[in-house]
Structures are given as C-alpha cells and as structure tokens.
Amino acid sequence: MSSADTPMMPKPWDLKVFEIDVPLDCFIEFAPLVLLWKSRVEGGPLPSWSSFTPHDLLPWLGWIAVEDFTNPPVELKCRLWGTQLTELYGYDLTGRRLSQDMQRRGILDEDLSFYEELFDHRRIGLAAGSISWQGREHVSIHRIFLPCASDGLAVDTLLSCAKPATLS
C-alpha cells in the first residue's frame, strides 16, 4: 500500500450532548426535525423509530441515517444511509456495521464514548467536523443524533441527519 492509499488520521469533531428536554433553540438548524421527533413520543421519554413515516421525513430525505444499536460493546448497524450522505461521505453504509468501517468512517475513541452517552443516558447529540480522514478538510458537516426506543425507554435506534457546509 502506498502512502497515497493510506487513510489520513481523522481530526476530532466537536461533539456535544444534550438532555432530551432542552429548548429547541439549541438546535437552530435542526429545530424542525427535533420538533417532529418530540411530537412522536408516546408512552415514554423517547419516540419509537416505527412512529415515523417516510412522508414525515420528506424535508430531510437523502440526509437521514438510521442506525440500530446493540451494547456492550457499542455496535451500530446502519439500516438506512441516505443518498445525499453517500454523495457527501463518498460511500454507502446501508447494511454495514460500525465495527466493519471504523477506519473508513474516521471513528476515534471519543466518538465511541459519544455514542455510548447517547444510548446509555438517552441524550441528543450534535457533531460538527470535516472529512479530514479523506483529505477533505474543506468539507464541513453538522449532524444531529436523535435517540429512539421501541419501548419508549431503552434506546435501540439512532435517527440522524446531516447538513453540509463549506469552510471558508
């Protein structure tokens, strides 16, 4: 493998975790999606992924990812990886497991801790960073992670949405 084929080390992303009842103004660019997510809560603090329809998610189609969770250890299996995410990141993760794609996804230890916090403590996550591990520091991404639970309590799915931005 030549040095040109060797992936670059990812730069850490800015990762933030929020209680599920924080005000919408914490998520300005994602506020409509968070409002929808909160509107689907039935019988517990979290909505179930099954309470969303494709029609509900029309404004974000292509930018949505749905990942099923198992723990321990932290493992995510991507049920859905939107077409716009595929274009943005340069690969399709549908049907793939996190453990299969740690290097390609640029996953660091702090990313695993971030996922654990979302799942273990039912938190909303925000992430911002670039695709530095592909040598594309100029591509900036903001992403929200919304936990879902089939029983309203135990997180088993993450609904996420990305928004790209170009760094100047």
Image (cartoon, helix red, strand yellow):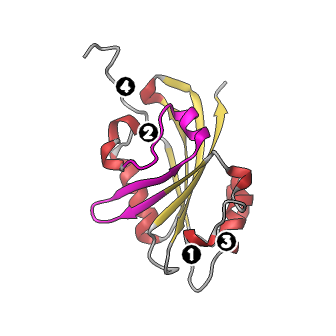
Q: Position of residue 132 (x, y in %)?
A: 46, 29
Distance from disc 1 to disc 2, alpha carbons, whole Å, reads: 29 Å
Q: What residue is drawn where x is 62% and y is 46%?
A: 63
Amino acid at the residue labelled 3? Lys
Please rate how many residues cluster around mark 4, counting C-alpha atoms within 10 Å: few if below 14, some from 14 to 19, many from 20: some
Of residues 13 and 43, which is closer to you in this image? 43
**Which type of secondary structure does the marked residue at label 2 adopt?**
loop
Report which residue position mark 3 lands on: 38
Instruction: Return the disc, 3 or 4, that comes first in the chain's sequence.
Output: 4
Is residue 29 in view? no
| Secondary structure of residue under mark 3 | helix
Residue matched to label 1:
46
Question: Which of 72/16 is in front?
Answer: 72
Label 1: how many Cα within 10 Å (few below 14, some 14–19, many 20+): many
Q: Secondary structure at mark 1?
A: loop
Residues in magenta, as a range: 67-96
Q: Which of the two discs, 4 and 2, sits closer to the camera?
A: 4
